[in-house]
Image (cartoon, coloured by chain):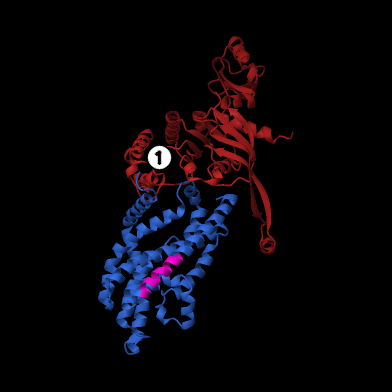
Amino acid sequence: MTGGLLGFYRVVAATAVQVQFQYRTANYLYMIGMVAEPVVYLVVWQTVARAQGGAVEGITAGQFAAYYIVWTLVRNMNIVFTPYGWEERIQRGELSGQLVRPVHPIHYDLAYFAGWKVVVIVLWVPIAAVLSLLFRPTFDVTWVEGVVFFVAIWGAYLIRSLLLWALGMVTFWTTRVGALYQLYFTAELLLSGRLLPLALLPAWAGTVADFSPFPSTFGYPIDVLAGDLSTSELFAGLLQQGIWIAVGAALVAVVWRSGIRRFSSVGG
Amino acid sequence: METEPVIRVRDLRKTFRVPEREAGLRAALKSLVRRSHRDVHAVAGVSFDIAPGEVVGFLGPNGAGKTTTLKMLSGLLHPTSGEAVVLGSTPARREKDYLRQITLVMGNRNQLQWDIPAADSFEMNRAIYRIPDAEFRRTRDELVELLELGDLVKKPVRTLSLGERMKAEIAGALLHRPRVLFLDEPTIGLDVTAQKRIRAFLAEYNHRHGASVLLTSHYMADVQALCRRVVVIDGGVVLYDGGLRELTERFSPHRTITVTLPDPALDLGRYGEVVQPPDAEGRVVLRVPTERSSAVAAALLADAGVSGLTIEEPPVEDVIEQVFAASREPA
């Protein structure tokens, strides 16, 4: 017997690695396409910084470069099983196949996308090197920040996975969950640190963001490596991630229980 | 000795509430305000038992309630009422121990990973069902051999033909040696050779491991090759539950007699109903009541001097159709 649930995670993640390496060119093109977004933000902010004498709200051109280069990795860590996938899964009847297995389907998604991340990280390294040569980032990373960053990117992955799984399960009630996802996506774009560093948000928006899970999935992991967080801020961020993981897990459990009851009564 | 059934179903019912509206813009606007629904009784009180090791054909036209019943038995659907007990468990609870002992194969759905070789998907099933390594290797090798998969398991699933893929799907679904197999159209869309291979395999698997099988198929050859017993269902109710042979005897009161005439002008109307007049070789097809078929055959040989006489039961498809027709006749 090889390791129960852990063995399952290992095998599924390894499967994902095999699948994604088969599509390495497509993955690379996808990642290069994805770099366009932060490069646009970066060029804009660096231009503004230079026009304002070298910094915006204390963030220098080099810090902006560091922020958006780390952004590219965190963005990839944020790719999880989305509500669109849920729509497809239910419409194609794939969920039925998963339900007759003695493993909760979320474990499959978590393990599969985690395996994919391994490929992403490998492919990301040269992209980050090229961006660093082009935009000259300013990094000042301690080993503690390095370790916390490693934990934080997986925390971000887990939070986003759980929240989008819970949102995706709305498909049990409506086949148009994509509209809800768009709403989530817009809020996330503005409040997570994806569009701009959280320090540049207006005060009221910053307060709203503080009470949302979004900074834990984007701004916080980036700031761990590219920002200037104190040790207590580093660990407070991890604690916050822990809280959102617990909230996400509880949400998944509740929505799953009631969603599966509905699926079992209306059919799939 | 009385054997406990592996599957016990009593008055099982499943009713779906489905939205409906007339066609057109007016009806679409009206449905925004007031939605109307209709109750569809997909399964309307089904009862049967299946013994250990038994292979039962579950037959019926599209929409008869076969797949809904299979889904209730495999835990995918909650029954509206009634009782279903499989291997001592209530399927709707979907307990892990229960799910480890069953499998559901749906001919039109894929479980194997599309982009990687089936062998890798088998590995995943090993982890899912927590199969000990030695047992996994033994079962995998046995299934690969029985299904004549060979090196096909090393090719990405997307490159396999439909028949090869289905064989790999079945191997993947049986790696954990389930005690109960729910097979929903396992040979759908396959060519005759692949169908035969899968039938032979299922028969061998049942023989070796004593698994109970509930099989739905529109191919009567599947049913004839594998099932001694059939449950015929239509409109969510069981129309017949018994031996396949008894089904033919009960619902087909006729036999078909084919003879070759020495003289094509000979009129055989007095022996039975001529359903096909003499062809170029002088072959005539007669339909006669089952109880008279032996006497008519003897008379044809003695009086009419025919040659090449054969007596055939009607095809099972026709018999099943007869069952449906009988159930729809007004009482």
Residue A241 lies in magenta, yes or no?
yes
| Whole-percent x, y for residue B276 in the image | 60, 25
> Callout 1: few (<14), some (14-19), or many (20+) C-alpha neighbours within 10 Å?
many
Q: Residue furthest top?
A: B302
Q: Quadrant of residue B325?
A: top right
Query: Is there any visible trace of residue A234 in the rendered image?
Result: yes
Judging by colour alone, the chain drawn in blue in this rendered image is A
| Whole-percent x, y for residue A233 in the image | 37, 75
- Tell me which secondary structure the magenta stretch mostly adopts: helix
Q: Chain of mark 1?
A: B
Drawn colour of chain B? red
Quadrant location, the N terminus of chain A? top left
For label 1, the residue is B175
Q: Quadrant of residue A223?
A: bottom left
Residue A187 lies in magenta, yes or no?
no
At horizontal 33% and vertical 45% (from top left) the residue drawn is: B155
Which segment is the magenta one? A232-244
- Viewer-proximal residue, A74 or B169? A74
Q: Quadrant of residue A142?
A: bottom left
